[in-house]
């Protein structure tokens, strides 16, 4: 679980702390020096980095030839970078990685929310979030390369609730103007409303 102070200081302010935690739990890593390399859809085994220098050496070795993900947020290394030598060590700094990763994820979330028509119902948010996580992991959503796509800029107005957030149960009491629901006993006493006795040719 992420440190609350790290989230407050470093995470993108447009995302609620609970969403940041859920994002890192779903798509990221607990290790700020974590480097994941995939080539042709297959995971490439790389040595576990013990220092920022080692992590960056792995990143520079594979960037440009494979999909390289880095740090707490598994930020895609090389986004907006033309040369591997331009990759900065702040990619494996916990705070900077969280800052860059959550800012990029917030953009992905806006792209997905826009595709959904920017709904305001809190019931839709879990689906938007799931699709945004999938887009983060794959780099694509509905044929759009989300990391290179332009930011729609529209803030996500949907209440950002995690799946574990309890929703208040609706009261069973009927609202004013509504009829009280029939009980099973009342339904049983209702009598026959349609004459079915002639079905099947019976008199």
Image: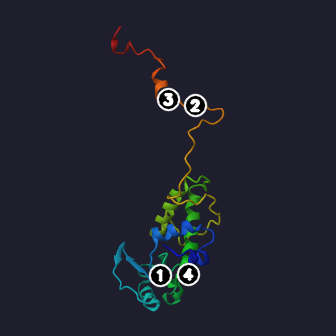
Judging by the rendered image, the residue that carries numbered circle 1 is 32
Front-most of residues 115 and 33: 33
Q: Which mark is residue 59?
A: none
What's the CA distance linking mark 2 and mark 1?
A: 57 Å
Viewed as shown, does residue 99 lie left or right of 195? right
Could you tell me how far apart the alpha carbons at marks 4 and 3 are, in whole angstroms? Answer: 58 Å
Percent coordinates x, y for residue 107 in the rendering: 58, 68
Counting residues from the start of the chain, the first of labels 2 and 1 encountered is 1
Asked whether 184 or 37 is in front, the reply is 184
In this view, 157 is above or below 59: above
Query: Disc 4 versus disc 1: distance between alpha carbons?
Result: 9 Å
Within-10-Å neighbours for mark 4: few <14, some 14–19, many 20+: some
Q: Which residue is mark 2?
A: 180
| Residue at image point 46% right, 25% down | 185
Residue carrying label 4: 95
* Rendered location of residue 60, percent (x, y): 45, 87
Label 4 or label 3, whichever comes before in sequence order: 4
Q: CA distance from mark 2 to mark 4?
A: 55 Å
Give the percent coordinates (x, y) of residue 23.
50, 68
Q: State the CA–CA distance, disc 2 to disc 3.
A: 9 Å
User: How far across and down, in percent of the image, does residue 57 sit?
Assistant: 43, 90
Q: Earlier in the sequence, mark 3 or mark 1?
A: 1
Q: Nearer the viewer, mark 2 or mark 4?
A: 2
Mark closest to the chain's N terminus, 4 or 1: 1
Q: Secondary structure at mark 1?
A: loop
As drawn, the label of residue 183 is 3
Left or right of 201 on screen, residue 2: right
Question: Please, what secondary structure does the residue beneath circle 2 have?
Answer: loop
Residue 118 figure quarter: bottom right
């Amino acid at each position: 679980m992420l440190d609350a102070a790290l989230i407050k200081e470093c995470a993108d302010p447009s995302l609620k702390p609970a969403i940041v935690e859920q994002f890192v739990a779903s798509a990221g890593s607990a290790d700020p020096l974590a480097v994941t390399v995939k080539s042709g859809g297959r995971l490439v085994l790389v040595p576990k980095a013990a220092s920022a220098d080692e992590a960056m050496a792995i990143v520079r070795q594979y960037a440009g030839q494979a999909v390289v993900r880095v740090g707490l947020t598994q930020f895609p290394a090389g986004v907006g970078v033309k040369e591997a030598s331009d990759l900065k060590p702040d990619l494996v700094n916990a705070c900077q990685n969280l800052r860059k990763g959550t800012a990029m994820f917030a953009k992905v979330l806006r792209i997905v929310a826009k595709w959904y028509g920017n709904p305001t119902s809190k019931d839709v948010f879990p689906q938007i979030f799931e699709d945004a996580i999938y887009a983060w992991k794959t780099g694509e959503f509905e044929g759009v390369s989300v990391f290179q796509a332009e930011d729609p800029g529209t803030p996500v107005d949907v209440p950002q609730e995690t799946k574990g957030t309890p929703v208040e149960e609706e009261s069973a009491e009927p609202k004013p103007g509504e009829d009280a629901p029939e009980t099973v006993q009342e339904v049983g006493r209702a009598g026959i409303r349609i004459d079915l006795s002639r079905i099947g040719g019976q008199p």
